[in-house]
Image (cartoon, grey):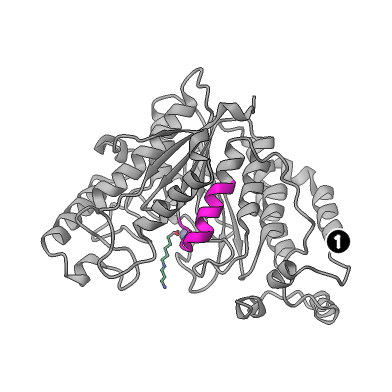
Amino acid sequence: MKRSSDGALLFCEAAVEHHSPWKSIEKPSRVLSAHEHLRRCGLLRQCTVLTAPSASEAELREVHSQRHIDEVVRLSAAVGDDPHNRTLAEPDGRGGVYYTAAADEAARRACGCVLEASRAVLQPGARIRRAFALVRPPGHHAGYDDTEGHRAEGFCFYNSAAVAAACVLRSGLAAKVAILDWDVHHGNGTQRLFYGRQDVLYLSIHRMGRGYYPQTGHNDEVGEGDGVGLNVNIGWPGDGLGDADYMAAMELVVIPVLLSFAPDLLIISSGFDAAEGDVQGRMNVTPKGFGDMMCRVQQHVCCPIVASLEGGYCEPVLSLCCEHVLRALLGMERDCSQRRQAMHKLTEPTLREVIHIQQAHWPSLRTQEERTHNYFLAAQQDSKPTRSSSRVRKAWPVDSSAASKKRHQKKASSSPKASSAAR
Ligand code: OKP
Ligand code: ZN
């Protein structure tokens, strides 16, 4: 089933015409440099490389209001006519979402890639059941948006993962779709779009906290109506979490829930801004850590998988993350065992809270309480030895025995300042 010769589909859409005249972290070179890296390390040759047509207006309308689409079209054209009007181009202020003459078309092309990838892996008798869509601009902050004024935000115009999910559901290629979003920002658009829907499960692992964009993604946002229980947020209330923490979230929450839901398609909104070195995320996930998560998911979930790029702004790291995730999708990375690392002090309380909230909806979380207990117990024992590598120290710089004792005395909930200071 998972022979590496089955390969993967790679869709690449750098949308070079869409770039800010004022410098932005969301730029064409993100995708161009990653693509060049994949070529250099020989991975492109192992993939079937495809491009896709732009998503049609009807396809966008599966998730976006006509008003929203018209607004993006109108603003793109307006900026085309007045390209140096910064107030027009950056309606959220400097450094936020920016419009260009090419914004609308660029975002339609990104949607087209994720949609085509999803159709390809779902097509009856498909030989290739995994795909990676290396696309920009990102999409997960874009919602239905039938409100007055501009609602594109966070560099996103149309929600590519959501368009793909909604279209394959509409056409009957899938009856249930899961979207796993490990971009460091909460996918407020995706959550909102499927919040009341029974046929889409949204899981997100993200940084959560006051002042942290986009301010949504609380662990108790579980869905509404028919969609109750089908929204799973894992919001980290601090900086500096790494491989061990993300893997714990996968093992203890994401994978059990995915197994219970049994989707026909898994779309991974694969932003890499939780990677070490990415100043947006201030997290410490390594490129191998992302590959390990991808590998672990594939060991459990047997449905087709489409991973598509969302954020990720430190280009050298972004390239490596793409490499590791693609290797995993190609079946070249079979060993996802990690050297045991100390977990962040926020990991256990966060995951316990999520499990507590979600176990009403997911019996599998209830029945594995003992497993959860043992998981943290083992991790605690493993982190006891005083010798720790520089990597562990970087991820958890307060790991001296004195600080450790303090940790046990008071269940701290403040963010670990020490880890951001270490960068
Ligand atoms: C999009 B994606 C600048 C803050 C910019 C916008 C972040 C958009 C992230 N100081 N905030 O989820 O990676
Ligand atoms: Zn992000």
Query: Does residue 56 appear anywhere in the picture?
Result: yes
Q: Label 1 amino acid? A: Asp
Identity of the residue drawn at 45% across and 33% down: 118
Q: Name which quarter of the figure residue 415 lies in.
A: bottom right
Q: Name which quarter of the figure residue 357 lies in.
A: bottom right
**Residue 77 screen position, x and y as percent:** 15, 55
- Residue at numbered disc 1: 382
* Left or right: residue 395 compared with residue 139: right
- Residue most toward the top? 125
- Residue most toward the left? 81
User: Which residue occupies the foreground of this view, 1 or 209?
Assistant: 1
Residue extent of the magenta highlight? 311-324
Instruction: Classify 9 as above or below 83.
Output: above
**Residue 210 screen position, x and y as percent:** 52, 73
Identity of the residue drawn at 38% across and 47% down: 159
Q: Name which quarter of the figure residue 239 lies in.
A: bottom right
**From the image, which quarter does the C terminus lie in?**
bottom right
**Residue 348 screen position, x and y as percent:** 74, 62
Identity of the residue drawn at 31% across and 42% down: 109
* Left or right: residue 156 compared with residue 337: left
Identity of the residue drawn at 53% across and 59% down: 317
Of helix, strand and loop, which one carries label 1?
helix
At label 1, counting other C-alpha atoms closer than 10 Å, the crowd grade (few under 14, some 14-19, many 20 or more) is: few
